Image: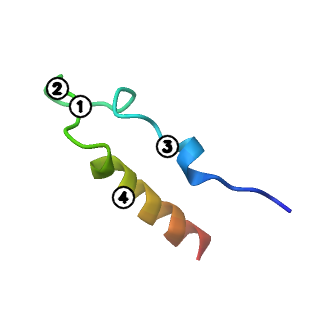
Amino acid sequence: MLEYNPLACLPSSEELPDSDDTPVDNELQDLIPSLLKAVLAMA
């Protein structure tokens, strides 16, 4: 059986691009949309 761990595939806030060279305030700002995309891709 294939084991899928979506959290292992997600980039950290340091790896994500930004437009004003400031870090992301909250990692959930990026985790939630990515998690929703992963769930929709499996459906």
38 relative position to 22: left or right:
right
The residue lying at 36 percent from left, 58 percent from top is: 32
Q: In which quarter of the image is residue 22?
A: top left
Label drawn at residue 10: 3
The residue lying at 58 percent from left, 77 percent from top is: 43
Residue type highlighted by circle 4: Ile
Q: Do the residues labelled 1 and 2 touch (CB within 8 Å)?
A: yes
Disc 4 versus disc 1: nearer the observer: 4
Which residue does the numbered mark 4 point to in the structure image?
32
Residue type highlighted by circle 1: Asp
**Which callout, 4 or 3, points at the residue further toward the start of the chain?**
3
Which residue does the numbered mark 2 point to in the structure image?
22
- The alpha-carbon separation of the residues under discs 1 and 3 comes to 16 Å
- Residue 40 in the image, given as x and y percentages of width and height: 50, 71
Q: Is residue 38 above or below residue 25?
A: below
The residue lying at 57 percent from left, 53 percent from top is: 6
Q: Quadrant of residue 19?
A: top left
Q: In this view, does 15 lie above or below 35?
A: above
Q: Residue furthest right?
A: 1
- The alpha-carbon separation of the residues under discs 4 and 1 comes to 17 Å
